[in-house]
């Protein structure tokens, strides 16, 4: 019997007939293979229905009716074992694969503690427009993994999640040492003791000196708001989504006027891997300035592309861990490994700073630009992101139409 606690992947495996109920309510796409591979294991039915404001009892009753009347399905096989997801990681693209290999190597070397660990490691970009919005509808902490690792200023910082879980003390910071001064000097650690700040995706500029011409190389982030960079900057984004990790610091420093100017000055939104191939080439799709993660910038081979670490600091796009406080002892072995010097060196070697105090940060210039906890706690982050998007897209769509 379906209760609503099942994840979408479990429902899809029960019977193909269930998709008819999903399609009737406009949710058919969630049971398609491409979405199941991305969010099926993360997303419980209750969370999806809450996020979509669909009445739960009738929907679940319809599913059970279809399930028990399916000619090819016997009721005795419908009750499936519920396996909680112990550890879920949604990481920046430059970190996902090396972290997965590193973690699974550790599991292979230490099989006994992890034989029954149910985990999933994904790229963050897969979930910005899919899984993260569903967090606003979750009301029961049992629907959340024991340990969550996530990236960027996403829905974990939105008011629904903050009020239901963060402010209720469901999670507790796990740092078995005084954090490394490299990030701690900017106040990276959560003073309230809820988020464990793990690492950061450091966002910097790359300047194509040929396309820049006689213009001065930008030295700080506000330089990108100058009129001479109109339609000549590329940042991470796509058709109707642009990186909040970039826009939030611009808003904090200069308000909505900065978001309007960014919309004028941004030429296009691309994945950082696409920027690596484009920067320093003579292709017309390129631009004078790229805003991208440090990891990707270090992969650019073209000599005319120059990395610029802004004077006011690389933008710190957070990578954090949320640990349920009543699960800390159960997963202490894994947590100690995640916070270890070895893990820190793995991160640093891939241009992601570590908070472990034994890790050297010689790969990183000293300045970093962090939004700060005062800003994150006082702002309605979810509403602010919506407002920024509206302001940005109003200018962006006008520019697109005129061109």
Image: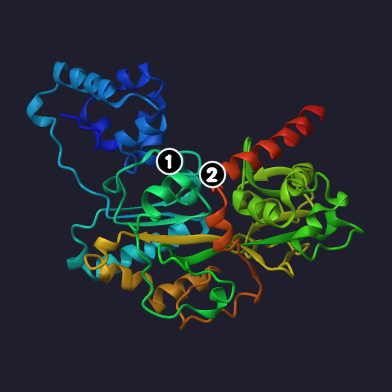
Of 317 and 289, the residue lying toward us: 317
Q: Quadrant of residue 266?
A: top right
Residue drawn at (13%, 22%) of the image: 73
Residue drawn at (79%, 50%) of the image: 282
Q: Position of residue 123 (x, y in %)?
A: 46, 51
Judging by the rendered image, the residue that carries numbered circle 1 is 136
| Mark 2 Cα-neighbour bin, 10 Å: few <14, some 14–19, many ≥20 | some
Q: Quadrant of residue 12?
A: top left
Mark 1 lies on a secondary structure that is helix
Judging by the rendered image, the residue that carries numbered circle 2 is 382
Which quadrant: the C terminus?
top right
Q: Position of residue 400 (x, y in %)?
A: 76, 31
Q: Position of residue 350 (x, y in %)?
A: 52, 68
Do labels 1 and 2 touch, CB within 8 Å? yes
Residue that protrudes farthest toward the left in the picture: 76
Q: Earlier in the sequence, mark 1 or mark 2?
A: 1
Which label belongs to residue 98? none
Residue drawn at (50%, 79%) of the image: 180
Distance Cα–Cα, label 1 vs label 2? 9 Å
């Amino acid at each position: 019997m379906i209760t609503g606690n099942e994840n979408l992947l479990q429902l899809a495996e029960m019977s193909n007939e269930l998709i008819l109920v999903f399609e009737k309510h406009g949710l058919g796409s969630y049971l398609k293979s491409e979405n199941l591979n991305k969010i099926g294991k993360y997303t419980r039915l209750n969370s999806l229905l809450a996020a979509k404001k669909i009445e739960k009892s009738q929907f679940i009753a319809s599913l059970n009716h279809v399930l028990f009347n399916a000619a090819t399905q016997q009721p005795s096989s419908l009750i499936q074992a519920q396996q909680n997801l112990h550890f879920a990681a949604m990481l920046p693209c430059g970190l996902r694969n090396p972290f997965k290999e590193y973690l699974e190597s550790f599991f292979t070397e230490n099989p006994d503690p992890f034989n029954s660990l149910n985990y999933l490691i994904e790229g963050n970009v897969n979930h910005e427009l899919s899984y993260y919005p569903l967090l606003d509808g979750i009301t029961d902490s049992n629907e959340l993994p024991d340990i969550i690792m996530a990236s960027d200023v996403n829905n974990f910082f939105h008011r629904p999640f903050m009020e239901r879980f963060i402010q209720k003390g469901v999670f507790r910071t796990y740092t078995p040492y005084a954090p490394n001064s490299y990030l701690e000097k900017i106040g990276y650690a959560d003073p309230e003791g809820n988020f464990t700040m793990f690492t950061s995706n450091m966002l910097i500029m790359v300047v194509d000196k040929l396309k820049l011409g006689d213009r001065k190389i930008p030295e700080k982030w506000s330089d990108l708001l100058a009129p001479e960079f109109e339609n000549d900057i590329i940042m991470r984004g796509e058709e109707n989504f642009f990186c909040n990790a970039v826009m939030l610091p611009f808003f904090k420093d200069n308000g909505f006027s900065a978001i309007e100017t960014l919309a004028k000055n941004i030429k296009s939104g691309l994945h950082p891997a696409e920027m690596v191939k484009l920067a320093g080439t003579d292709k017309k799709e390129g631009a004078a300035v790229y805003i991208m993660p440090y990891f990707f910038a270090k992969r650019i081979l073209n000599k005319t592309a120059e990395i610029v670490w802004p004077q006011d600091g690389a933008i710190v796009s957070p990578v954090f861990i949320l640990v349920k406080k009543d699960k800390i002892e159960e997963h202490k072995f894994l947590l100690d490994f995640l916070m270890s010097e070895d893990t820190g060196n793995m991160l640093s070697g891939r241009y992601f700073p570590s908070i472990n105090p034994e890790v050297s940060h010689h790969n990183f210039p000293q300045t970093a630009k962090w939004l700060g906890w005062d800003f994150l706690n006082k702002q309605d982050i979810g509403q602010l992101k919506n407002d920024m998007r509206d302001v940005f897209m109003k200018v962006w769509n006008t520019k697109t139409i005129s061109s």
